[in-house]
Image (cartoon, rainbow, N blue to C red):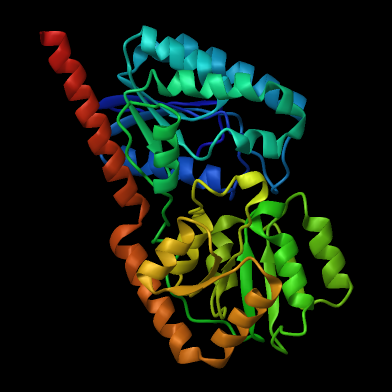
Amino acid sequence: MESATHVTSHGGGRRLCYFALDVPHRGQASFIHIAQIIKNLRERGWQVDLYAPEPTDGGKQPSLIWRLFAYLRVTARTLLALREYDAVYVRAHFLAWPVTLAARWHRLVILQEVNGPYIDVVVSYPWLKPGARLIAWLYRSQWHRCDHVLPVTRELAHWLRQEGIERPITVVPNAADTALFHPLAPAASRPFVVFFGGLTRWYGVDLMIDAARSAAWPAGVEIVVIGRGAQESDIIAAEKAGAAIRWLGYRPHEEVPQLIAGAIAGLVPATNPAGRSSTGVLPLKLYEILASGLPAIVTDLPGQADLVREGRCGLVIAPDPAALAGAVAHLRAHPDEAQAMGKRGANLVASAHSWATRAADVDAILTACLRKKSDRARV
């Protein structure tokens, strides 16, 4: 992803405005998702212009004031430029409402990518709870005006139907950059399992810490943690207290494949605070773990548990420290089984879950929407 608020790609072809109010840092899942969809759509002949806040380095989230000013600047630039485009791709955000409304007024094709239910906003920012009903309305009113809605899980698609969204819905999940994440020869090191990504409560930080401290944890195995977030201080404290944890902090995304090579497994111990995971969990890290040829240990939540079970590419556990420790011990004691799981996972991602595959799906949806719009105009 280019580091500019408005990035214009030159050349002919179909014109797409990509609007994202996320404030991503380089290496964060949203940053990677945006960059990969744009890159692969351009390779399919789309002229894609990105309107998004300036990405940040080092994994630190900018201040709220910084973000609000960034939202205003990006929104204003997008509104001024909308008439240049044939279609708008919006990463769903309640503050994207003006852009969605203006795009409908300009009669543009509108796609919205939905990454979670309304409750995600309140879980992330509890002080917004008094405005929860307004936030829900701002989301729903946008989805009712879209040509197509793109949830990232099957459960999220079902939830949208329950919320009364009658627009066409197609599930377009996360994926992996298979040119970057693929099986690599392990570097010589002591046995480890790996977690990478945001260090937040719902990604299972407490669960990992408690598992590493438990009597069931296999001797000599450590959890290598890559990432930053609200609970990084808890990880640091646990490491200092002697838990089997080694924190590497933030690392650029392109360094991650080599850092995780040779791990016993990749951990995706997501939890379900306030029911936020009931609409499915298919995080980017899961696809990257599998693409790297590692078995995944995932908690039994819709989406990620289904993928691992159906692909026979890891272990599904209860969100319990003893269960996590037991799964690590099992894979440590059965390396042939772990290797077979890893091979199945890598083959699954390469064949069906690359970003090129996801962009082909989006391309087909955009093309169909534009054709339908053109047919209506001729009537």
What residue occupies the far front of the structure in this picture? 162
* Residue 87 in view of the camera: yes
User: Left of 109 or right of it: where is 175?
Assistant: right
Toward which corner of the image does residue 303 lie, by quadrant? bottom left
Residue toward you, 276 or 329: 276
Residue at 62% across, 76% down: 193
Q: Quadrant of the C terminus?
A: top left
Q: Position of residue 238 (x, y in %)?
A: 84, 69
Residue toward you, 59 or 7: 59
Residue at 53% across, 64% down: 300
What residue occupies the far right of the structure in this picture? 241
Q: Position of residue 342 (x, y in %)?
A: 43, 77
Residue at 64% across, 56% down: 203
Toward which corner of the image does residue 363 lie, by quadrant? top left
Q: Position of residue 348 (x, y in %)?
A: 33, 67
User: Left of 190 or right of it: where is 310?
Assistant: left
User: Left of 6 or right of it: where is 146?
Assistant: left
* Residue 200 in view of the camera: no
